[in-house]
Amino acid sequence: MFSMLEVTYHTIVRRARGGHRNAVVGLVLNMLQSLTMIMAFLIFFQILGLRSSPIRGDMMLYIMTGIFVYLTHIKALGAVMGAAGPTSSMMLHRPMNTIIAIMAAAISSLYMQIITLFVILSVYHIVFNPITIHDPIAAMGFFIMAWFSGCAVGMIFLSLKPWFPRFTGIAKNLYVRVNMIASGKMFVVNTLPASMIAMFDWNPLFHNIDQMRGAVFLHYNPQFTSVSYPIYLSLVLIMIGLMGEFFARRHVSLSWFAGR
């Protein structure tokens, strides 16, 4: 057990570096990506004439609640889907196995997003405008729930990747693009008509972002989203993904990828 924990730790560190010798570089690049999306959405809202938050509170905090939850979900999905598979050269080093690779990918993704979240919020709070979070413990819970649901979706793609490598790449990109709108980070769910809510209600990220804003803002109470739906859906997807990964691991072969 201790040997596996040590291998997991070193794999997490390796993943957190993001391909750089210095882990700080990977962290800074992750922060720059978050800041770029925040500034892009701020400019977008300015062009639309939305100079104040649709919810009573700080406009930047409204934008960041959507961006951070979305990026955490997407980063977790990409990290789990990109974890080393059974044919990877890393699997030649015991006690390394695919479960360690998946855990390391998921935890390193969460680590990077939590550090990014705290640094950006702290700088904004100190330098620009003091912020108040209504229920910080619940807000962090929904933040972690977005990461967990991203890991669950990533497990489904990971279990399909050995069988349909090109399809899973296209499906993952499609899922990321669809969630730019379907996640609900650009609008307030309580103001949507029932027809639009029905279009996005399938998405666990849609529920996470709305519930996150209910925890962050004192004057917002989510009416049409659920706390339990993302949890139950993620648990189901995790179990299906683990069964699919176990089956694929027993049948995968290097020769599958010879002509791909």
Image: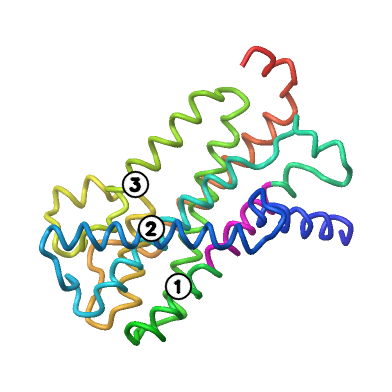
CB atoms of marks 1 and 2 within 8 Å: no
As helix, strand or loop, the secondary structure at mark 3 comes to helix
Q: 177 left or right of 93?
A: left
Seen in the image, is 84 located left or right of residue 67? right
- Label 1 neighbourhood size at 10 Å, few (<14), some (14-19), many (20+)? some
Residue underneath mark 3: 179
Query: Which element type, helix, strand or loop, lies under badge 1?
Result: helix
Task: Tell me which residue sits at (34%, 87%) in the image.
Answer: 130
**In the rendered structure, which amino acid carries the disc numbered 1?**
Ile
Query: Main SS type for the magenta part?
Result: helix
Decide: marks 3, 2 in contact (CB < 8 A)? no
Residue at mark 1: 120
Quadrant into which the C terminus falls: top right
Residue 229 x %, y %: 39, 57
Q: Quadrant of residue 39?
A: bottom left
Q: Residue 249: where, in percent of width, then height?
A: 72, 31
Q: Is residue 249 magenta?
A: no
- Precedes in sequence: disc 3 or disc 1: 1
| Horizontal arrangement in the rendering, residue 248 relative to residue 90 (left or right) | left
Residue 38 x/y as whole percent: 34, 62
Which of label 3 and label 1 is nearer to you? Answer: 1
Q: Is residue 54 above or below residue 246?
A: below
- The quadrant where residue 81 appears: top right
Q: Is residue 113 magenta?
A: yes
In the image, the segment drawn in magenta is 102-114
Categorize mark 3 by other alpha carbons within 10 Å: few (<14), some (14-19), many (20+): some
Q: Amino acid at mark 2?
A: Thr
